[in-house]
Amino acid sequence: MKRALEDVKILDLTHVWFGPYTTMLLADLGAEVIKVEPTWGEMTRFFPPLVNGVAPNFVYFNRNKKCITINLKSEKGREILKELAKKVDVVVENFSPGTMEKLGLGYEDLRKIKPDVIYAFLSGYGQYGPYHARPSFDIIAQAISGLMRLTGDEHDPEGPPIHTAQAPGDLIPALFAVISILAAVHHKRRTGEGQKIDVAQTDCMVSVIPAFVGYALTGMTPKEQSKKYFTGVYGSFKTSDGYVVIGSPMGAILDRLTKAIGVERIESRAVVDEWTKARTSKEVVRILEEAGVPVNEVLDMEGAMKDPHLIAREMFIVNEHPRAGKVRMPNFPVKFSETPGRVLTPAPELGQHNVEVLTTMLGYTKEEVAKLKQEGAI
């Protein structure tokens, strides 16, 4: 089966979630991703809980990749990285801004030896600006973008900010990084030009909050707008045995919801609350689904993994890892008719592909690779 990015080579110097999720998606689409780790391994390898010495997050974010170890503090290690950079299309890193430049491995350094290099900088605050040198994680991006306050306001305007689970401040910027890298690859194939890509978590999180426009025009937060203007029923509702979500904006859908629950008018969510609490989640879903109202049960992780629709859509696959065993994990989500994303290989062991990459891509002999290891370069 053909793979969309099978002729794209990527040198991956990323760690934790933001960078590895970016390169995982590219690897799922067929890119050859060579993950470069320090000789002791990147930090996500050691995040608990460990299963047979393997970290679940690492197993997920690093599937379909090859792994080599390079000591970038050694001169020979930096030489090897430069040699590899000549052989790939894209270099991706998410160190603190300035780190790679101090090592002589920044964009301008690599551009001298590979003029058409695409170099993607992934960071918290970007490569310039007053905060650019600050360290960052997902929760920081959620905070500066306003997302945490918006989420808190939805629950209790007077209460604390609430951060969204599962690190959208990492995973959403990763999607922008993938889009940007693919755009740069396309541009390079048209023009022969490489370029620098600056992807900041904070920038990306701001861009996915359309509420800024409403606030700029009205001075009201989404919560304040919803108090002043009734625009329909949208949110989670308690049932007799759990929760459901209902999405019913003004218009025909709200009319259908009104008829389905047997009332004359819906002017607030209170009447819907009363109706759902008297019924089970499955009963609510059945009635509203028959009425053509968007609705679904609120599932926990076990429920999601057993949901018949997600199973039919092949959203969970089993990938066999040599130490962790059979690992059930989310599949690549988008369906292609000709070049599907696929999960072929498990997350690599530390330095698993040292010999393969250095002999096939750079022409080293196995003896030379062994010497590099002895010298501490890899």
Image (cartoon, rainbow, N blue to C red):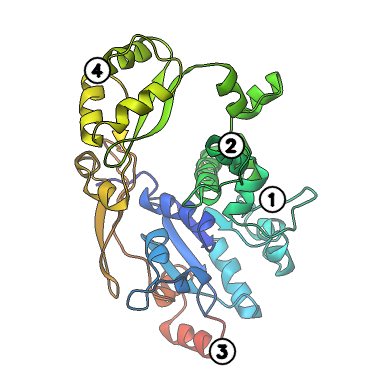
Task: Count residues near mark 1 (Cα–Cα under 10 Å), then give few for <14, some for 14-19, many for 20+.
Answer: many
For the residues labelled 1 and 4, the Cα–Cα distance comes to 47 Å
Counting residues from the N terminus, which is met first, the one under dot 4 or under dot 2? 2
Task: Count residues near mark 2 (Cα–Cα under 10 Å), then give few for <14, some for 14-19, many for 20+.
Answer: some
Callout 2: SS: helix
Callout 3: SS: helix
Give yes or no for contact between labels 3 and 4 (Cβ–Cβ under 8 Å).
no
Q: Image height check: is 50 above or below 367? A: above
Indicate the position of residue 337 as horizontal and vertical percent values. Answer: 26, 35
Going by the image, does 252 lie left or right of 13?
left
**Amino acid on which disc 4 is placed:** Ala
Going by the image, does 317 lie left or right of 74?
left
Counting residues from the N terminus, which is met first, the one under dot 1 or under dot 2? 1
Which of discs 3 and 4 lies nearer the camera? The answer is 4
**Tag 2 residue:** 153
Going by the image, does 272 lie left or right of 78?
left
Indicate the position of residue 69 as horizontal and vertical percent values. Answer: 50, 75
Residue 125 is labelled as 1
For the residues labelled 2 and 3, the Cα–Cα distance comes to 57 Å
Task: Count residues near mark 4 (Cα–Cα under 10 Å), then give few for <14, some for 14-19, many for 20+.
Answer: some
Residue 291 is labelled as 4
Which of discs 2 and 3 lies nearer the camera? The answer is 2
Residue at figure coordinates x 62%, y 75% from the top left? 72
For the residues labelled 1 and 2, the Cα–Cα distance comes to 25 Å
Residue 185 visible, this orientation: yes
Q: Nearer the viewer, residue 179 or 160?
A: 160
Q: Nearer the viewer, residue 86 or 102?
A: 102
Give yes or no for contact between labels 1 and 2 (Cβ–Cβ under 8 Å).
no
